[in-house]
């Protein structure tokens, strides 16, 4: 860290403690330009990730974790490393299989897979996905679930679908208040 105001304070100390990370301060003027460039890359990547997904500003902590996880996965020099997950775009529409305690079927022949929005990755080994159920989001509930079985849904051109781009302003306000 370059000891900038956004990198010091109780909130940052608590975040680092939760993630079991140690802070490493740079010496004045030593590699400051490199540090600032990395911070700018992460800041701009997080902003673009969140805006592309259609999520409100309040979701930036999830967007930054998602951006960094995807960046590290794509730029890893550990070719043989098995992370257990494929990168997913933040906020993209997915079909997922809920864990057995979260499965609800109306009848024996009803589909078990649910539709949701990619929101992050779990800290477990093997790694899984954090998903927001689309029906819950439409009902104004911001409830996440985790799973390892996910399929990215794409449009006719093979591009990911971002369902929060198509929600009404009222629905976005409901999500923002949660």
Image (cartoon, helix red, strand yellow):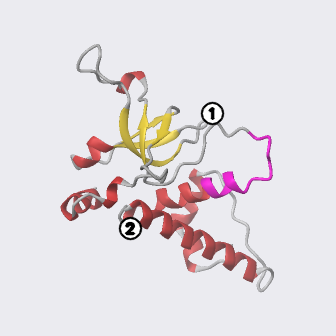
Residue bearing mark 1: 126
What mark, if any, has residue 24 been given in the picture?
none
* Residue 58, position as x, y percentages in the image: 38, 64
Residue bearing mark 2: 57
Horizontal arrangement in the rendering, residue 55 relative to residue 30 (left or right): left
Looking at the rendering, in which quadrant would you find the C terminus? bottom left
Name the residue rendered at 33%, 24% in the picture.
Answer: 111
**Residue 79 in magenta stretch:** yes
Q: Residues within 10 Å of mark 2 (few under 14, many from 20)?
A: few
73 lies above or below 7? above
Tell me, yes or no, if residue 82 can be seen here: yes
Q: What element carries label 1?
A: loop
Q: Give the residues in magenta.
A: 69-81
In this rendered view, identify the residue nearer to me: 83 or 168. 168
Name the residue rendered at 22%, 64% in the picture.
Answer: 169
Tell me, yes or no, if residue 2 can be seen here: no
């Amino acid at each position: 860290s370059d000891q900038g105001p956004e990198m010091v304070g109780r909130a940052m100390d608590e975040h680092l403690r939760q993630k079991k990370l140690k802070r490493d301060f740079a010496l004045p003027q030593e590699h400051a330009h490199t540090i600032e460039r990395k911070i700018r890359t992460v800041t701009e990547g997080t902003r673009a990730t969140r805006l592309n997904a259609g999520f409100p500003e309040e979701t930036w902590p999830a967007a930054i974790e998602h951006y960094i996880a995807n960046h590290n996965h794509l730029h890893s020099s550990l070719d043989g490393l098995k992370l257990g997950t494929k990168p997913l775009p933040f906020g993209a529409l997915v079909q997922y299989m809920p864990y057995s305690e979260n499965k609800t079927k109306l009848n024996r022949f009803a589909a078990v897979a649910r539709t949701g929005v990619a929101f992050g990755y779990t800290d477990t080994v093997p790694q899984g996905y954090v998903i927001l159920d689309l029906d819950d989001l439409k009902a104004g509930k911001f409830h996440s679930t985790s799973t390892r079985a996910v399929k990215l849904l794409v449009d006719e051109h093979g591009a990911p679908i971002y369902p929060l781009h198509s929600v009404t302003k009222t629905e976005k306000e409901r999500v923002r208040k949660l």
